[in-house]
Image (spheres, rainbow, N blue to C red):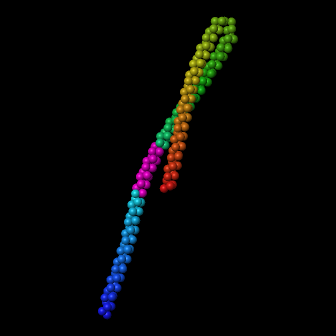
Amino acid sequence: MNKFLPNLLIFFSMALCGLCVWQWTREGKLMTEKISLHNQIYTNQVTIQGLEVNVKKLRGDVDRLEKVRAELNDTIKTNMATIRELEKLADKLTRDNAALEDTIATYKDALDTANERIKAQNEDIKKQNELIREVAQQRDEKIGELNKMVEEYNKIVKDYNKVVEDMDKLVAQFQEYQKQVEENMKRR
């Protein structure tokens, strides 16, 4: 029995040593996993911060694009008002032209009537010829004014067409940018 107790003590101490080795090994693995998880958490936090910065940047871009869209809408409204004014001016010019044509027709009728009544008198014929020249000169002046107005209207229409083309280009760029943003959002 003398040998049994020391052998039992040696057995328990060896079992205790084995238990310690097993615990140290387990603790080492757990520590390695802990460090790995800590590194993953840190990496995820850095990624989240980067994504938050990107979101802020994209929000700024969206706000900027909203401002551009609002400016373009204001430009469209201004252009529509200008078009309405130009249409009113064109209607007025058309009415003035019709009035001038009526005046010319009236003068022609008056000339014909005067020529039929006063064929015998040369002096009256000369007066009528002078009257016709004045009317023709007025007509030419009015037609010249009308031509200038038409040229101005054509210039305004060209400017408007250019603005519309520029706006179409901006809208196309905006739509392309919006598609890119949507694609970027889908990728994420």
Q: Is residue 159 left or right of residue 128?
A: left
Q: Nearer the viewer, residue 55 or 77?
A: 55
Q: Residue at x 58, y 17 (%)?
A: 138
- In the displayed orientation, state which residue is furthest to the bottom: 1
The location of residue 146, given as percent across then percent down, is 57, 23
Q: Is residue 156 left or right of residue 19?
A: right
Q: Using the image, determine if residue 41 lies above or below residue 54.
A: below
Q: Is residue 120 highlighted in magenta? A: no
Q: Which residues are magenta?
A: 47-67
Q: Is residue 102 left or right of residue 175?
A: right
Picture quadrant where residue 83 is located: top right
* Residue 101 seen from this side: yes
Quadrant of the image for the N terminus? bottom left
Magenta portion: prevailing SS class: helix
Q: Nearer the viewer, residue 129 or 18?
A: 18
The location of residue 162, given as percent across then percent down, is 54, 35
Q: Residue at x 61, y 24 (%)?
A: 98
Q: Nearer the viewer, residue 97 or 151?
A: 151
Q: How many marks?
A: 0
Q: Residue at x 64, y 6 (%)?
A: 123
Q: Residue at x 52, y 49 (%)?
A: 179
Q: Is residue 65 highlighted in magenta? A: yes
Q: Using the image, determine if residue 59 lies above or below residue 97.
A: below
The location of residue 72, given as percent across then percent down, is 49, 40
* Residue 84 seen from this side: no
Q: Using the image, determine if residue 144 lies above or below residue 71.
A: above
Q: Nearer the viewer, residue 4 or 100?
A: 4
Picture quadrant where residue 135 is located: top right
- In the displayed orientation, state which residue is furthest to the front: 3
Q: Is residue 160 left or right of residue 129?
A: left
The location of residue 66, given as percent across then percent down, is 47, 45
